[in-house]
């Protein structure tokens, strides 16, 4: 917290991080933050998304995404996953887990 942020800014960013973390969990993904401690590290403070069940990296290879980029990606994933529910309601086939994983990869 000694990096120029006020306590309120810190709490606001932590609340947003928790929001994105919960959003990822609802989609079966796990938000991971880089463990780099030095600000000079290439991935300090950056994030990636893993598949919660397999641990496979879905987005942000080598922790290359900011929290906002991860949130934007999750928004795209939500839109993509809502489409099959709509298709199901109108009699189209349900997608398989493999197709779901492919859709996640195509969104990024």
Image (spheres, grey):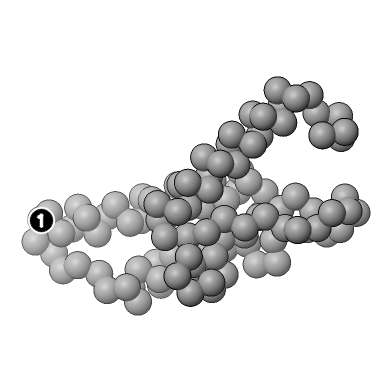
SS at mark 1 in the image: loop
Where residue 19 appears, as percent x and y from the top left, is 52, 40
The answer to whether 99 is drawn above or below residue 36 in the figure is below
The answer to whether residue 79 is visible is yes
Residue at horizontal 65%, vertical 67%?
Answer: 61
Q: Which of 89 and 48 is in front in this view?
A: 48
For residue 34, what is the image quadrant?
bottom right
For residue 102, what is the image quadrant?
bottom left
Q: In this view, does 44 lie to the left or right of 104?
A: right
Q: Nearer the viewer, residue 66 or 7?
A: 7
Which residue lies under the disc numbered 1?
90
The residue at the far left in this view is 91
The answer to whether residue 106 is visible is no
Residue at horizontal 48%, vertical 65%?
Answer: 52
Where residue 87 appears, as percent x and y from the top left, is 18, 58
Q: Which of 33 and 76 is in front in this view?
A: 33
């Amino acid at each position: 917290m000694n990096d120029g942020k006020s306590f309120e800014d810190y709490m606001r960013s932590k609340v947003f991080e928790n929001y994105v973390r919960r959003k990822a969990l609802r989609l079966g993904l796990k938000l991971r933050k880089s463990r780099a401690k030095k600000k000079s590290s290439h991935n300090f403070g950056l994030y990636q998304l893993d598949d919660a069940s397999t641990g496979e990296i879905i987005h942000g290879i080598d922790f290359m995404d900011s929290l906002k980029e991860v949130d934007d990606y999750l928004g795209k994933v939500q839109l993509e996953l809502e489409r099959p529910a709509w298709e199901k309601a109108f009699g189209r086939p349900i997608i398989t887990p493999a197709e779901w994983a492919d859709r996640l990869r195509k969104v990024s």
